[in-house]
């Protein structure tokens, strides 16, 4: 009685769960072994695709044949159950294994006739071609699905696949978790580490920092997704408010966000060392005295330690240097008021231009849809162009919204900036160190210190105000823009 091994395989977990493919194969193979007087030494079962080498049970089967020279018979249902790649074909041939294929009525070995080997080779080629064609069709189908706005893969946290109608739907159990992740981070005062701790405390979910970063940056929550290098507008329902999503993206993109500290030091992040350009950091001494000093990242530094109270007094002078006198403030605000009509005219012109573009895009969409219904353009062309036009439509709508917000606030912002410069120093003197730090961050982008003097770098437009205040040149020429 010859010794033999059996090999059965299904290509997916779904087929395994169905419960008929593997049992059916094993029944056929066992009956074949009994009928042909083979003694089954071992059975190997894989639930993996055969398009690439590296299957676990297949590898163990090769090891079995290498360790059992008296077992040289392998029984498998048919060629494509055994392999769909040439590497595995060659491995079994080198081991001099006699392969029995009951469904194909073939026995393949080194002593087989050339015609049998040729036909077996044809089966291997056909199996390989089948998997390549299947892969191509799957890719084509997934791209078509993406063009329809349906994400063709597993969606991120807060969504789930609907296997009945093959769409993406909201997962009501996970939505609160995702919302809290975005809400907490959008506050602007937490790091990813702190976000991780807060999410764990509030929801009990232990999520890695990298995973949180991936969630917060995922355009899927903004209504879009990327597939095969292209951006598509998704049909999934939005679970994150668009304004919160945009704010989170801004926080990631803004390199000048405040750093995170366990202790709220008033002037952290404002100062750099004049000697080596390192940051100036703060340190708490004896649990009540705060000193600022160079971080010393480039080695020992000559910058002396400075008490927070002393530093605060010196920083106050920076705000005094941008003071706008009361009479000058009144003149400048009158100029701003007289300029308001020009602003309204410009705003109306820009709004009309954007509205015309929006109407043109919508006409193109309507006309192309009519052409699709009449058969003048293909559905594929319609899907591709509709995606592009829909993206353009949303961009124009966002530009219109931004125009309303930006232009309506511009004069008010300018007026408040002038008022801030007028009152900044007097406000500074009445505030706590933490509030003083916030005020300084509105005015400064950086400030270098040697321990005695300060060299501020003002944010715009406070740099211009500083220059005007220094030279007392407040009024622009009448032929320029006031």
Image: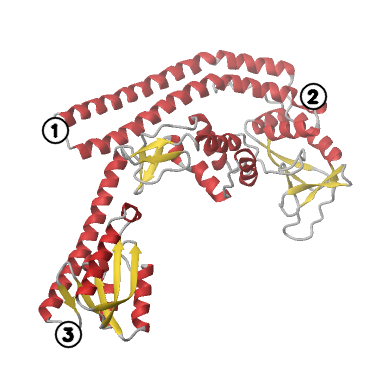
Q: Quadrant of the N terminus?
A: bottom left
- Residue at position x 34%, y 49% from top? 228
Vertical comparison of 415 with 227: above or below: above
Q: Is residue 359 visible?
A: yes
The disc label shown at residue 70, or none: none
Secondary structure under the numbered disc 3 in the rendered image: loop
Q: Secondary structure at mark 1?
A: loop
State if disc 1 and disc 3 touch (CB < 8 Å): no
Few, some or many residues within 10 Å of mark 3 (<14, 14–19, 20+): few
What residue is drawn where x is 16% and y is 35%? 377
Q: From mark 3 to mark 1, how far is it between C-alphas?
A: 61 Å
Residue 125, percent from left and from top: 19, 68
Residue corresponding to mark 1: 376
Q: Earlier in the sequence, mark 3 or mark 1?
A: 3
Q: Is residue 425 above or below residue 337?
A: below
Which quadrant of the view contains residue 251? top right
Q: Give the mark, 2 or 1, whose residue is nearer the N terminus.
A: 1
Tell which of 465 and 55 is nearer to you: 55
Query: Which quadrant of the view contains residue 115?
Result: bottom left
The CA span between labels 2 and 1 is 72 Å
Dot 3 corresponds to which residue? 111
- Camera-side residue: 402 or 285? 285
Q: Position of residue 458 (x, y in %)?
A: 67, 36
For label 2, the residue is 426
The quarter holding residue 194 reads: top right
């Amino acid at each position: 009685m010859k010794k033999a091994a059996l090999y059965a395989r299904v290509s997916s977990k779904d087929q395994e769960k169905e419960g008929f493919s593997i049992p059916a194969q094993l029944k056929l193979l066992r009956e074949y072994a009994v009928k042909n007087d083979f003694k089954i030494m071992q059975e190997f079962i894989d639930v993996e695709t055969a398009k690439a080498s590296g299957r676990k049970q297949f590898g163990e089967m090769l090891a079995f044949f290498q360790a059992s020279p008296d077992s040289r018979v392998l029984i498998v249902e048919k060629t494509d159950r055994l392999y769909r790649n040439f590497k595995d074909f060659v491995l079994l041939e080198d081991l001099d294994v006699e392969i029995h294929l009951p469904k194909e009525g073939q026995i393949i070995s080194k002593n087989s006739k050339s015609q049998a080997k040729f036909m077996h080779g044809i089966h291997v080629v056909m199996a390989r071609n089948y998997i390549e064609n299947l892969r191509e069709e799957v890719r084509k189908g997934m791209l078509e699905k993406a063009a329809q706005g349906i994400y063709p893969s597993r969606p991120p946290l807060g969504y789930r696949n609907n296997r009945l109608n093959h769409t993406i739907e909201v997962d009501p159990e996970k939505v609160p978790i995702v919302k809290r992740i975005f809400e907490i981070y959008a506050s602007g005062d937490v790091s990813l580490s702190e976000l991780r701790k807060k999410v764990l405390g509030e929801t009990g979910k232990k999520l890695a920092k990298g995973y949180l970063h991936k969630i917060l940056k995922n355009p899927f929550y903004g209504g879009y997704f990327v597939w095969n290098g292209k951006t598509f507008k998704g049909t999934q329902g939005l679970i994150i408010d668009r304004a919160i999503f945009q704010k989170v993206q801004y926080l990631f993109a803004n390199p000048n966000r405040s750093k995170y500290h366990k202790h709220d030091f008033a002037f952290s992040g404002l100062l750099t060392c004049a000697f080596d350009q390192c940051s100036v950091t703060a340190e708490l001494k004896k649990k009540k005295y705060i000193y600022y000093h160079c971080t010393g990242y480039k080695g020992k530094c000559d910058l002396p330690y400075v008490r927070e109270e002393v530093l605060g007094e010196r920083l106050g002078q920076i705000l005094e240097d941008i003071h706008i006198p009361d009479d000058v403030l009144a003149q400048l605000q009158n100029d701003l008021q007289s300029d308001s009509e020009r602003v309204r005219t410009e705003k109306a012109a820009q709004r009309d231009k954007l509205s015309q573009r929006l109407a043109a895009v919508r006409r193109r969409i309507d006309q192309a849809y009519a052409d699709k219904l009449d058969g003048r353009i293909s559905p594929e062309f319609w899907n591709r162009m509709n995606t592009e036009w829909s993206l353009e439509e949303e961009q124009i709508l966002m530009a219109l919204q931004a125009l309303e917000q930006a232009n309506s606030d511009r004069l008010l912002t300018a007026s408040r900036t002038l008022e801030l410069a007028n009152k900044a120093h007097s406000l500074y003197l009445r505030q706590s160190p933490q509030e003083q730090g916030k005020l300084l961050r509105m005015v400064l982008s950086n400030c270098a210190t040697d321990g005695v003097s300060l060299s501020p770098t003002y944010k715009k437009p406070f740099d211009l105000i500083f220059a005007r205040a220094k030279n007392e040149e407040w009024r622009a020429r009448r032929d320029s823009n006031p």
